Amino acid sequence: MAIICRRAQADDLSMLSGIWHEKLTILAGADKRYMPTSDAGARWLEAAMLWLSDETCAMFVACADDRPIGYALGAVQSAPPGLSYPLMGAITQMAIDPHGYYGGAARMLVEAIRNWFGERDVKRVVVYVPHRSPAEQAFWRAYGTSEWMDILWLKS
C-alpha cells in the first residue's frame, strides 16, 4: 500500500474529522481536559474549513489507497518579541488513523509542513504535543525535537 501526502481538500474533512475525534476521545481517557462537547465534530469541521482558506495555515493529508488516513496542521505565527526571528511555525495538530499501520505517514506529514514553512522562510518550528500521550511524545523525541517551553494549566 503506497502512502501519498498532499494538501488537504474540503472533500477530505469528513474522514479527517473522524480521525481527529477518535484521537480526542483517546486523549480524554488519559486527561479529562480533552473531553469533547456533543458538537465537537461540527466545530472541528467548521474550523477546518477556515484553515483550508487561511494563508497562514497548511493542512496536509496522508492517504493510502486514495483514503485519508491522517493529517497534520501547521500555522505561521509571530515569534515572541525580541527574538532574532520574527516568525515561527507551529504544528498544532497531527493524527493518524489508529486502526492500521501506516509506516512513514507521520514523517511524510511533518516533512510536508516543514517544506511549506521553508517556502515562507520560517525556520523555527514548535510542536503542540499532549503531555499524556506517550506515543506522540516518543515520535517527536525520535524526530529530534527538544523541550523549549512548558505550558501549564491554571485551574479557575
Image (tube, helix red, strand yellow):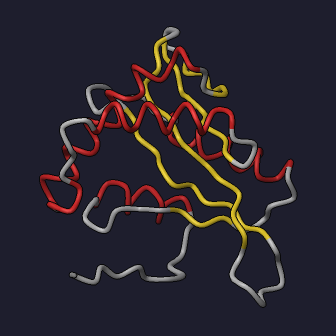
Left or right for 147, reference 43: right
The front one of 124 and 80 is: 80
- The residue shown at (21%, 46%) is 36
Q: Residue at x 43, y 24 (%)?
A: 69
In front of the other: 130 or 102: 130
Identify which residue is drawn at 65% across, 53% down.
75
147 or 89, which is in the foreground? Answer: 89
* Image coordinates for residue 20, horizontal then vertical, percent: 35, 37
Q: Residue visible at 71% across and 50% down? A: 114
Q: Quadrant of the C terminus?
A: bottom left
**In screen coordinates, is 150 left or right of 61?**
left
Image x and y of residue 31, in percent: 17, 62
Can you give x and y, in whole percent of width and height, for residue 54 in the image?
69, 41
Give the mark count: 0
Q: Residue 4 location, x and y as percent?
A: 60, 22
Extreme residue in the bottom direction = 82
Left or right: 24, with 2 as reference point: left
Compared to 71, does 110 lie above or below? below
